[in-house]
Image (tube, helix red, strand yellow):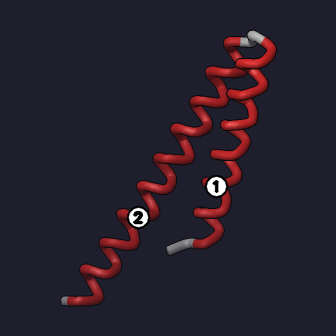
Amino acid sequence: MSVGNRIQAMVKNLEGRLEEAVGALTGNQRLKAEGQMKQAQANAEHTKENLKDRAKRWIDRT
């Protein structure tokens, strides 16, 4: 588990939420979509880290 990667993903998720909210408030659809994209990327990064952790645990068991 890379704590640094998880922190980067959390920051990216927060940036995405902020961009999405600002885009929604201002009516800027591009900004809103970019925020949603950043959130999706952050979720993918979290999933990748979870899979790496599971693989490491499985290898350590065998």
Q: Position of residue 22 (x, y in %)?
A: 78, 25
Residue depicted at 42% across the width and 55% down the height: 47
Question: Is residue 43 left or right of 52 when viewed as pictured?
Answer: right
* Residue lying farthest to the left in this orientation: 62
Residue depicted at 39% across the width and 68% down the height: 52
Please state which of residues 58 and 36 is positioned toward the viewer in this rendering. Answer: 36
Q: Position of residue 30 (x, y in %)?
A: 69, 15
Q: Quadrant of the C terminus?
A: bottom left
Please state which of residues 52 and 30 is positioned toward the viewer in this rendering. Answer: 30
Q: Are marks 1 and 2 in contact (CB under 8 Å)?
A: no
**Which picture quadrant has residue 61?**
bottom left
Is 49 rendered above or below residue 11?
A: below
Crowd class of label 1 (few under 14; some 14 to 19; many from 20; radius 10 Å): some
Is 56 rendered above or below residue 47?
A: below
Crowd class of label 2 (few under 14; some 14 to 19; many from 20; radius 10 Å): some
Question: Is residue 26 left or right of 41 when viewed as pictured?
Answer: right
The residue indicated by pointer 1 is: 10
Please state which of residues 18 and 5 is positioned toward the viewer in this rendering. Answer: 18
Indicate which disc, 1 or 2, sits on the residue closer to the N terminus: 1
> In the rendered structure, which amino acid carries the disc numbered 2?
Asn
> In the rendered structure, which amino acid carries the disc numbered 1?
Met
The residue indicated by pointer 2 is: 50
**Which picture quadrant has residue 27?**
top right
